[in-house]
Image (cartoon, helix red, strand yellow):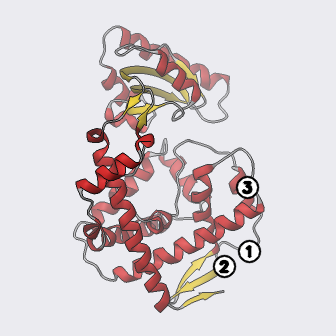
Amino acid sequence: MLAVNKRIAPAAVAALLLFAIPACNSSKETPQQASLSNEQGSPKDVVQKVNGTIITRGDVNRAVMALLEQGQTAQPPTPEAMRQASQEALDQLVSAELLYQAAGKMEIKDLDRQVAQKLAQSRATKRNDEEFQKSLKDMGLTLQDLQELIRKDVVISNFVEKNFVPKAAVSDAEAKQFYEANKDKFQLGEMVRASHILIGITENAGAEEKDKAREKAQGLLKRVKEGEDFGVLAGTNSNCPSKVRGGDLGAFGKGKMDPVFEKAAFALKPGKISDVVETRFGYHIIKLTEKKEARAESYDGAKARIQSYLQKEKTLKLVSDFVSELRGKAKIEKI
């Protein structure tokens, strides 16, 4: 199945948001972080200048983490993988800075609102403010640093939306042609839509913490079975960001969720509620709302995603060509 993001954003924009707050709570140092810890030099060391604007080693390290976490494994990355990730991260940071400089003093009437919204989204990935502040500290950032990075990301995104997206329109004929040439990409596996209530636990939770969380989950399950509204209980008790949607996780296929959670969800029938399910994140109560068997997706069903995908590809090409022009005129100094 073809998967694309609805929001048009070039790779440089994605890399600019250096502060990567993981969706899963973790206090352990990852293999990727350990590899970066072995890098020589201070995070404040300047590694490159772009028309006089500095890029520090800390900037590159944060961008590298964002890249490596996309394919995170339990093993430390090889020296060659680290070298490639560092070079890619630096290239994207240079591109992002050039785009930001090109945006200049572009007027964005609701800039503050957009920045506040993105900041709130970052905060929502953490269980509380203490964990959010710890993440900032671990990444070597202050709240003001994060706000500035988000502001730059918003400026570049708006610049791209205004100047390149309109030139990347996709016709029905183009979308249809792509569908016919790539029918193998439009096979839908079995999917379910589910909601859940999560009573979370910390990564190194002891028996007492687990017992309390399990007891709370069991109490909530009892209330659900007695007829209380699942969505309301999720909204007031769940530790997952999905609580703002009544616990709704949307539709997902196999291989997308925690294996234990996935097994329990796919075993349910629509409308049914699971028993308390324990995963590394805590204790879940799962409600299955829909199940779809494997099937071929129709063109009408895929059309919007295809157009979004092709528009994104066209936009990336336009932005890439524009950045190449900017690089040719820029003063880029390697320190």
Callout 1: few (<14), some (14-19), or many (20+) C-alpha neighbours within 10 Å? few
Marking on residue 45? 2
| Residue at the spot 30% in from the left edge and 82% down from the top edge | 105
Q: Which residue is mark 1?
A: 41
Residue annotated with mark 3: 77
- Cα distance in 3D space between marks 3 and 2: 23 Å
Residue at image location 56% in from the left, 54% down from the top: 135
Q: Position of residue 88 (x, y in %)?
A: 60, 69
For residue 294, the mark is: none
Query: Along the polypeptide, which appears first: circle 3 or circle 1?
Result: 1
- Asked if marks 1 and 2 touch (Cβ < 8 Å), the reply is yes
- What is the three-letter code of the residue carrying label 1? Gly
Q: CA distance from mark 3 to mark 1?
A: 19 Å
Quarter occupied by residue 208: top right
Tell me if 207 is positioned left or right of 199 in this view: right
What residue type is disc 3 on?
A: Pro
Gap in angstroms between the C-alphas marked 1 and 2: 7 Å
Q: Looking at the rendering, in which quadrant would you find the C terminus? A: bottom right
Q: Amino acid at mark 2?
A: Asp
* Count of number-bearing discs: 3
Q: Are marks 3 and 2 in contact (CB under 8 Å)?
A: no
Q: Secondary structure at mark 1?
A: loop
Asked if residue 242 is positioned above or below residue 137 in the image, the reply reads above
Which secondary structure lies at badge 2?
Answer: loop
Q: Nearer the viewer, residue 172 or 283?
A: 172
